[in-house]
């Protein structure tokens, strides 16, 4: 084990502050990664504040990690020192259950190991995320990052990217489909970019007319203001697919009304109770509502390769680790376009 | 137009009573049907009592119609006088929209004509259902009933049958799948019969341990008591498909927990608001909740042919039309195993 610098929260009410943590030295199948950049996901904030009632302190958040390979174990041939790599929300899983065999490690039946706040098989404690100098990860959970992408702006692909790419890909969104992306935040802005890159007629669905201009810059062909009943009626029964990124409970019925017969709306943001859904909203038109959680490793690599090919990255605002608490305050007010990314040099130099 | 005997409700608080109505004489493409039996669906009761706020009085309910062909128009070759036929929830649609072309007339984009309480293109008034001596229907909406089935017990196939068969068929339930049918009433008892006949390992999911014996007689391999948390936990993440026939609002979260990864629960009963669904119930395991409404004419014929082949009919209790109001009272208390069917001879002889 080696002691390294990190930023952590000690309890749910605490600000993040410097803390020394221990990382394992690379095992045979491990890759040790020098962390260059780490995106700031809303989940980081939830975990720090114990919103999901499962936080184990100290919490070192961060699961949108971009770095360079520092060292590889003897069993690693796929990566070499100096490679540009990424680590997302997962750092381990059983690799043997039916979910893992189906390349859906996020649903590992024996319990996936998440990048932070998850039981750590190696240390016996819990995992520490990317707000740290480096990280040691099993090779199966390390991703290649296309060299043509700006590595800073690629960081959020590891969570916000795969979370939105996966449902679009899994439900087969294709050229010419009419796809709606509901909510314009960290997830929504990636949803628009992906749907657009897949060739869909992409509609930003938002409560805020002020977001129209930005949405169009990001790739939206149209903007639909969800508070405008007349506009909503015009678009009724017309969408092939809806990606719902709203991060809190809300009324899904008006959105279900937008779906074509046999079409699906996928929820990726709201893990909490939603307002009462009318059975009739689904029965009339044989419509579906589904959920989706990040993506497996194979699909995450596909997503990164897709981004390399289509030159898709996030819109980001760079911060130093010393400003993380202010960034959290702004994040909570949705005051970011569209993702904070920490320059980890600020930690190493401190 | 010809005057015939029927039973109707004059207003939402009225009992049903005899009323003379007019039926059109057969047009070129029409089939005139002598009604032998008519099933009693919960929708009949909803429409009579104006629960959906759209009832046009007088309401003549009935959309589970079995009869013999009395007369055919000059354009009809598929049916001849004396054929055993059925009419379900639909008697007309535009036949030209994308839904109709996809054999999903129930979702006709120009508005399907339902068997009762729907705008009637021919009379200018509204349609009258099967609680009547005879009915005249466009040939495309008349179904052949296999001669090996008991015609009385075949009546409920036209609504309860297709409502449960359609989602099982559409979502591809097959031999060896583990299928749960939630709720044991008119719909649920058909769901069990169909899932069993399709070769699925069929589980009746009910709040009432008292229904276990019946469920097994109907074809359930297992009974799962939904109030028993330990039993529910044992079955977590194990179902390939759930058919949810609960007719009122309820909490779907415990049922969603039963679904396997990527599996779907289909709602066919509750057209009203459901209790708040947790986003996490779908996100964890990429699960879906969908709705389904009866079925198109092609699939309804397939269902009847399937019933002929597998000898599937409903469990019924025969009544005379004069007892319909008592039957409604009992229906509201779920005091029927499992469907009332009216012997229409009682109307003709009156």
Image: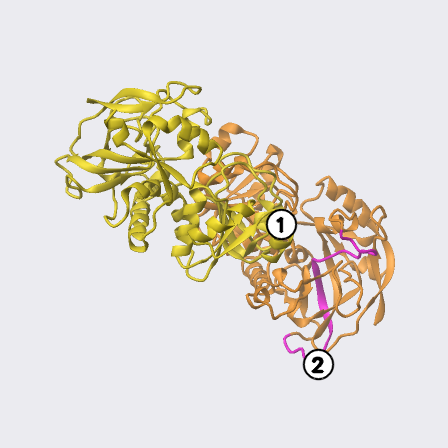
Chain colours: A orange, B yellow
On-image quarter of the N terminus of chain B: top left
Residue B111 quadrant = top left
Q: In this rendering, is residue B264 above or below A222?
A: below
Q: Is residue A103 left or right of residue B193?
A: right
- What is the x, y in percent for residue B197? 38, 56
Asked whether the beta carbons under mark 1 and mark 2 sit within 8 Å of each other, the answer is no
Q: Which residue is mark 1?
A: B228
Q: Is residue A275 left or right of residue B32?
A: right
Neighbor class of circle 2 (other Cα within 10 Å; few <14, some 14-19, many 20+) is: few
Frontmost of labels 1 and 2 is 1
Nearest to the observer: residue B106 or residue A243: B106
Whether residue B109 is visible here, answered yes or no, is yes
Looking at the rendered structure, whether the residues under marks 1 and 2 are on a common chain is answered as no
Q: Is residue B217 left or right of residue A137?
A: left
Q: Is residue A31 left or right of residue B2?
A: right
- What is the x, y in percent for residue A158? 65, 58
Q: In this rendering, is residue B24 above or below B64?
A: above
Total marks drawn?
A: 2
Magenta run includes residue A66: yes
Task: Tell me the element at label 1.
Answer: loop
What residue is shown at x 70% (from left), y 44% (from top)?
A: A336
Numbered disc 1: what chain? B
Q: Which residue is mark 2?
A: A74
3D distance between C-alphas at marks 1 and 2: 51 Å
Boundaries of the magenta span: A54-78
On-image quarter of the C terminus of chain B: top left
Numbered disc 2: what chain? A
- What is the x, y in percent for residue A232? 50, 32
Helix, strand or loop for the magenta stretch, by majority:
loop
What residue is shown at x 23% (from left), y 27% (from top)?
A: B349
Task: Tell me the element at label 2.
Answer: loop
């Amino acid at each position: 084990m080696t002691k390294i610098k990190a930023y952590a929260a000690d309890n749910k009410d605490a600000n993040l502050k410097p803390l020394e943590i221990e990382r394992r030295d690379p095992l045979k199948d491990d890759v040790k990664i020098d962390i260059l950049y780490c995106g700031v996901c809303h989940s980081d904030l939830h975990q720090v504040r114990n919103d999901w009632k499962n936080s184990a302190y100290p919490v070192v958040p961060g699961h949108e990690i971009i770095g360079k390979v520092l060292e590889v174990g003897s069993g690693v041939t796929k990566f070499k020192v100096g490679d540009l790599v990424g680590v997302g929300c997962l750092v381990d899983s059983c690799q043997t259950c039916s979910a893992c065999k189906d390349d859906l490690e996020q649903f590992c039946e024996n319990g996936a190991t998440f990048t932070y706040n998850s039981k750590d098989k190696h240390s016996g404690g819990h995992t520490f995320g990317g707000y740290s100098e480096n990280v040691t990860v099993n090779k199966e959970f390390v991703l290649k990052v296309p060299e043509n992408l700006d590595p800073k702006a690629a960081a959020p692909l590891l969570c916000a990217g795969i979370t939105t790419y996966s449902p679009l890909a899994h439900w087969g969104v294709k050229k010419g489909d009419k796809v709606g992306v509901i909510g314009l935040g960290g997830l929504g802005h990636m949803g628009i970019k992906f749907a657009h890159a897949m060739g869909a007629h992409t509609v930003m669905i938002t409560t805020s007319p002020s977001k129209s201009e930005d949405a169009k810059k990001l790739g939206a062909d149209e903007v639909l203001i969800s508070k405008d009943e007349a506009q909503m009626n015009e678009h009724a029964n017309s969408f092939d697919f809806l990606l719902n990124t709203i991060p809190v409970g809300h009324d899904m019925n008006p959105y279900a009304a937008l779906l074509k017969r046999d079409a699906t709306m996928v929820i990726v943001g709201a893990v909490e109770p939603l307002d009462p859904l009318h059975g009739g909203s689904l029965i009339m038109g044989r419509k579906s509502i589904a959920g989706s959680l990040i993506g497996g490793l194979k699909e995450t690599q596909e997503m990164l390769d897709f981004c390399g090919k289509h030159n898709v990255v996030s819109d980001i605002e760079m911060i130093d680790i010393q400003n993380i608490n202010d960034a959290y305050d702004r994040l909570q007010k949705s005051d970011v376009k569209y993702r904070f990314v920490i320059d980890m040099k600020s930690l190493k130099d401190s």
